[in-house]
Amino acid sequence: MEMIIKNNKIYNNSKAFLIAEAGLSHDGSLGIAKSLIDKAKENGADAIKFQMHMPEFESSKLEKFRKKFSFQDRSRFDYWKRTSFTFNEWHFLKNYSEKRKIIFMCSPFSIESVDYLLKLKIDAWKIASGEINNYLLLDYIIKKSSKPIIISTGLSDYSEVSKTIKYVKSKLKNKKIKNKLAILQCTSEYPTPLSNIGHKLIYKFNKKFDLVSGLSDHSGNLNSLISAITMGAKILEFHVTFDKSFFGPDTTSSITFEELKFLSEFNKDYNQIINSKIKNKKISNNIKKLKKIFHKGLALRKDKKIGEKIDLKDLIALKPNIGIPVKQYSSLIGKKLKKNIKKNNFLKREFIE
């Protein structure tokens, strides 16, 4: 199982692919959106992801807020409208992401937004949890593009997830597209309690559907993401924020950029650890040199003359390991010296009868 997003190969032995979800944290500001790209890149994300809402094609005045947070927006339709960008602005953000060498991703919520993203030539499709049963959208994407598709499962039970994955797989197979689908365990609670995240489903999805799997996280808890990496997640999506007191509906479900930096470093280090080629306890040449320094050899606690017998109380173990190793001390007990030996001098076999 593998997936390639631009130049990033995602497979069982790769590090996790990190998607920093900007969402609508920019609140309609192109400048803030640009800053989110900068901070995501600087702190180790592989991709920055936005959401492209075109309210006239996806919403109505009847759509209610998940969480009432805005003074200036009477409905989610108004919120989507106020925070949306023009095509030229999206084009700017895509180009700026490429300039910063971070992959630009954006979730579509309508056929029209798919058309925008096709023009922008995005590298992968991220299907939000609310669109998992939107076969109209999925069919259109598969028809128009051969780029990888990542599906979140936050608003679906296992039966719905299974049906959609089977459906998309069949469509991709008909188009002769392989290794272009991934699945993310997700729980659409904001923020999600740790006990409700469902980390164990990462492995279950991987085996059940034979797909690259991962986690779309809304806990705002760094430990959840670290745990996901250790439990086999190969794609991680998580909301990011400048500060957890920042304005917006998703800040309590987000990690900070400082936390992202830690996550990125852990991701790289953990991947090196689990892919270490050391499977047996062997000693390298460098360690052999250190053994002589840190191990001990046998010496005498006091001066002794030729012909005297060596007693246990005569022996002392000193660094470095010169002469007779300390582990062989018992072989010297009762043996006679063949020459005079001074205190703290190391013993050698030729000194012993």
Image (spheres, helix red, strand yellow):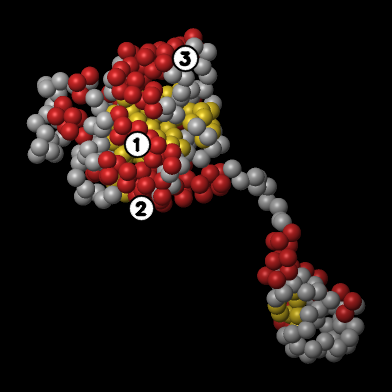
Residue 295 position, x and y percent, is 70, 69
Sequence-first disc among 2 and 1: 1
Q: Residue furthest top?
A: 174
Q: Nearer the viewer, residue 153 or 175?
A: 175
Instruction: Name the N-terminal-most of marks 2 and 3.
Output: 3
Residue 256 on image: x %, y %: 32, 49
Instruction: Check disc 3 and report its element: helix, strand or loop.
Output: helix
Residue 163 visible in the current orientation: no
Q: Residue at x 76, y 70 (%)?
A: 325
User: Which label sits on residue 172?
Assistant: 3
Question: Would residue 16 appear left or right of 348 to someone viewing this image?
Answer: left
Give how far apart the Cα atoms at labels 2 and 3 are.
Answer: 39 Å
Can you identify the residue that label 2 sits on? 258
231 relative to 35 in the view: left or right:
right
Badge 1 is on which residue?
Answer: 92
Against 265, is 158 above or below? above
Assign a secondary structure to mark 2: helix
Query: For the residue marked with disc 2, what is the amino acid?
Result: Glu
Task: Count neighbours of disc 2 (C-alpha within 10 A) and say few if under 14, some if 14 to 19, many if 20 or more.
Answer: some
Which numbered disc, 2 or 1, marks the residue closer to the eye? 1
